[in-house]
Amino acid sequence: MPNIDHEFHVDDFEFAHSKGERLIDRNYSSTSYAKDVWNNFKKNRGAFIGAIIISIIILMAIVGPGMNDYTYKQIHGGQECLVPRVPGLEKIGIFDGYHNGKNQYHEQEADDVYYWFGSDTQGRDIWTRVWSGTRVSLIIALAAVVIDIVIGMVYGLVSGFFGGMIDSVMQRFAEIINGIPTLVIVTLLGMVLPAGIASIIFALMLTGWIGMERIARAQILKVKEQEFVLASRTLGASKFRLIFSEILPNILGQVIVTSMFSIPNAIFLEAYLSFLGLGVPAPMASLGSLVSDGYKSMTTFPHILIIPVIVMAVLMLCFNLFADGLRDAFDPNMLNK
């Protein structure tokens, strides 16, 4: 390299902040991991809106069936297939009870009757049945989360932590269980158990935890050889303490995200089984059974099908958005992808 001499002058340099700016020292307080997760979650508008809509749907599932005088199984003769009619809105031409240019309520001499979502082919109130069915679907979704955490997470943690022959045997057993179609399991359970929520939850207990088990096992294989685990092992920590006090808190975020993604899958499974006639028995309602009933009258009275489809689609979409937002919040690196 040639030696290049360069002569510096006084005006080649100037002091920083020489324009009269006022310098302020800022101290940033440390925040907890939970607060970081919450701040990251709020940045995802889709997930935040999804969480709000989920809260509204859960609230309606709790209080909705009691907002009128009907029950989900009450049949009203002569009031079949009425279109939606809502007090107040009927005066502005919305939900006014008209179908094909005729006021169904006036023709059936039911001028003082209001069905907010209409009535089905047997004269039952769709409003009450939709929110009662949403309650059933949410119960099955909650059961799926509990099964994921209690069975799938514990199974995966034990399998991944001990490794060796124990891991090999447990994984072969999980592969055998996963190879059995859920539809076959539910059909066989229908021969032993009465059709309903119990048989669906039992089917989830047999096969629904496999996905969580694989996630938990993969996470513990990644974490168990890290320094903080080796330090606790050196200090004499028991295997139970290593698994549930040292490793589990460090993979809890991924466990929560996976359990949230299992909720729309459970709702879809219930709807699929109810559509095939293997779900909750009549007159009990679920979103799947309501879709199945409305499908038969889709061309003549589409409101019987459209309303439960919209509720189920919005519920599944919001849970997917919520789970996606949780994944980004727990893993900030995902925000930049």
Image (spheres, rainbow, N blue to C red):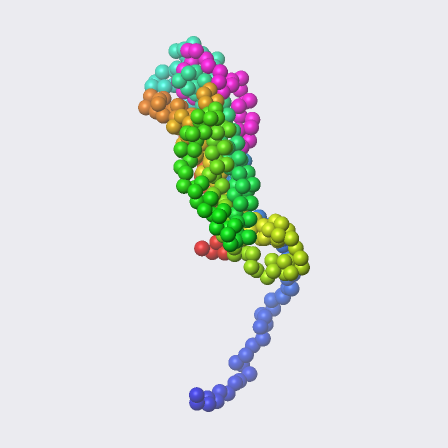
Instruction: Depth check: give the residue in front, 139 or 37.
Output: 139
> In this rendering, does residue 277 appear at all?
yes
Point out residue 216 in the picture as x, y percentages from the top left corner: 52, 49
Point out residue 226 in the picture as x, y percentages from the top left corner: 57, 60
Instruction: Depth check: give the residue in front, 4 or 29.
Output: 29
> Which residue is located at x 40 percent, y 18 percent?
121
> Which residue is located at x 67 percent, y 59 percent?
235
Point out residue 147 in the picture as x, y percentages from the top left corner: 53, 38
> Which residue is located at x 42 percent, y 35 percent?
182
In the picture shown, does residue 134 fall above or below 110? below
> Which residue is located at x 46 percent, y 88 percent?
4
Give the main secondary structure of the magenta stretch. Answer: loop
Q: Residue furthest front?
A: 165
Q: Quadrant of the C terminus?
A: bottom left
- Magenta span covers which residues? 58-85
Point out residue 10 in the picture as x, y percentages from the top left corner: 55, 83
Q: Is residue 110 left or right of residue 67?
A: left
Determine which quarter of the picture holds residue 92: top left
In the picture shown, does residue 216 fall above or below 286? below
Q: Residue furthest left?
A: 299
Asked if residue 282 is among those painted magenta in the image, a careful observer would answer no
> In this rendering, does residue 43 appear at all?
no
In the picture shown, does residue 219 fall above or below 199? below
